[in-house]
Image (cartoon, coloured by chain):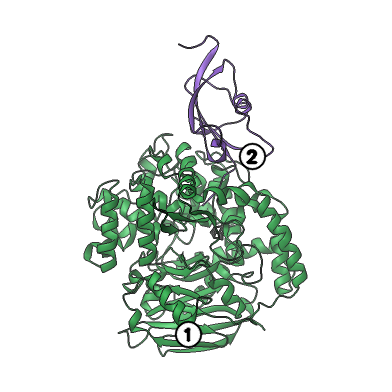
Chain colours: A purple, B green
Amino acid sequence: MRKAGYFTITIRLFAQYREGRFADREREVPDGAVVGDVIKSLEIDEDRLAVGIILLNGRHGKMDSALEEGDVLSLFPRIGGG
Amino acid sequence: MSDRIYRVDMSNLSFEIEDVPEAWQGLGGRGLTSTIVAEEVNPECHPLGPRNKLVFAPGMLSGTGATDSGRCSCGAKSPLTGGIKESNAGGTSAAILARLGVKALIIEGLPEDDSTFYHLHVTRENVEITRVPELVGKNNFEVLDIMAEKVGNKAAVMTIGRAGEMKMLVANISVRDPNGKLRSHGRGGLGAVMGAKKVKCITVEAGPDDEVSISDPGKLKAANKKFMHAILAHPVAGEGLKAFGTAILVNILSEAGGLPTRNFRSGECDFAEQISGERMARLITEREGDTAHGCHRGCVIRCSQTYNDEDGKYVTSGFEYETIWSLGAHMGISDLDMIARIDNVMDDLGVDSIETGITLGLAVDAGILDYGDGEAALRIIQDDLANGTPLGRIIGGGVGNLGRLYGLVRVPVVKNQGITAYEPRAVKGQGITFATNPMGADHTAGYAVATNILGVGGHLDPLGKEGQIELSRNLQISTAAIDSTGMCIFVAFPILDDPECMPALIDMINARFGIELDFSNVMELGKRILRTEREFNLRAGLNSAHDRLPEFMTYETLPPHDVVWDFTPEEIDGFWDF
Ligand code: SF4
């Protein structure tokens, strides 16, 4: 059952962000939540390893992007290769 | 001691050492190999005939102690693309050639007696050319062992395996790295050119007194300090690549819908996690491998690794994203251990793991093997490719040829070279690089993925067209310049983000040669190189009609973002307006 005033999103974490957290998890977030709120709740240390890439349903998102029921939010620190 | 040109003529097994012509003096790496090929090779020649030349050139800063400067360029007319080719590799060759004062090693002609192969041993003022019938049919690791006995393990070794002897279009030239493993001049069939010239291996040996001449060593050292600091302070170059290798890209590309899957049928792969950099890093650590290795001495980024099996026994090293993608998402193998085993066999045989992997993925469409059948892929490489059976020759002919032979329409090539690891429809800036670069589809030539996907050097929407041509142009120009310095292309990450980095690099070049280049001179150099390469291609018959992605990408919609390749021919041709 869904809590009133909350909705569910999927959070996927990558690279160092998985350490001490998780890779893939569903989470309830309060109505009106934006990407930045989720990042804050994950206690990501922006000084040490700032968020490099935010993907919201496979498209690049921003800190203030609004979230909706069923969204998939993927978070990466700065990464690269080639 | 000033730099010289070493020229070997295989037609009469002789060599000459020449002064460096004035026009070549400020050049190195790709700038030099492409200039020499454009000046001396008839663009209409057969790439495996007597008129093609194989050119090796260390970068401008190789051997100086500059951080990450140990890449060596190799150039020729490519038998795969029919155009000009430069492919650079790590290993020990660049620094040792530079210390000997070899500005470039040019190998020309074909021997009259083609019944055997030859070994070239390069030392100061000398090239010894000997017949080596005992090496014929041997693969790379065995050649390395034999050379270690013959010339010691301090010498650089460049060698071809059996694929190169058979002049296959997927054949590469392998280079010994500081750990006795292999790196390679992978793309474009340069191993076939070396095989055609009947050169099995080249060793290069410098003495303890052989040092690179540096005009202002103090200035170089100071600039290097700044440069190294900028690299190490960068989250990607200083930390990410060491921890996860280049395979860290698997997950993000799949999440962004840009990971070509099942021969470019989707941008998402449902087993991405299985072949991801995160998983690879975990396995390496559990099995006591090493996540951070440098492919040459002086690399501080260290994206390479050693990958062990479950019993902790060595399987492969230099296990790269593009190889993992080609055998993984593209061909369907989800077992990283199997991909690692195949990678090692390919290294030994001397084939480009990228072109070969993409060809095997296309072989699924051809009905030769099943999607994900790693055992079958291994068998084809070990039994067919290695022995040159008709099937081995077909796979060894690369992606484009396989497509033609089997009547396939969905063939992922540009200028007959396989498209790698980034879906052009969903990473459009990278698509422009694939389409326009004179080397054919080459992911390193203008890495727009950085700005389209990774947020390095700003951000551009990967699914939109806006700004992509300009982005790719700027990246291709700066990459041509960086490829001339001997620097690994991964220094581009800090260069794109940190304003201190490029000036430090330019200061090092100035200190080495006693010159006064500024940023605009360096960009001019990049432009000149690209134009020279394009000019060669035009004369070889590769024109704007070849600056195109495969047609199916213009009408087939790619999930999950439902995108097509929608640049017009005129827009693409505008790339060359500079
Ligand atoms: S970063 Fe990787 S490819 Fe570049 S020089 Fe270092 S080990 Fe080689």
For the residue marked with disc 1, what is the amino acid? Val
Residue A54 position within the rendered picture, expressed as x and y whole percent measured from the top left: 56, 34
**Would you say residue B503 is visible in this rendering?**
no
- What chain is tagged by disc 2? A
Residue behind mark 2: A49
Q: CA distance from mark 2 to mark 1?
A: 52 Å
The residue positioned farthest toward the top in the image shown? A4
Residue B53, placed above or below residue B369: below
Image coordinates for residue B425, horizontal then vertical, percent: 44, 42
Q: Is residue B325 left or right of residue B451?
A: left
Q: Chain of mark 1?
A: B
Q: Give above or below for B78 relative to B344.
A: below
Q: Residues within 10 Å of mark 1 (few under 14, many from 20)?
A: many
Give the mark toward the camera: 2 or 1.
2
Is the CB–ligand 1 distance for label 1 below 8 Å?
no
Q: Quadrant of the N terminus of chain A?
A: top left
Ligand 1 quarter of the rendering: bottom right
> Which residue does the image show at 26% across and 68% down from the upper left?
B388
> What amino acid type should be assigned to the residue bearing mark 2?
Leu
- Give the percent coordinates (x, y) of residue B257: 45, 38
The numbered disc on residue B8 is 1
Label 2: which secondary element: loop
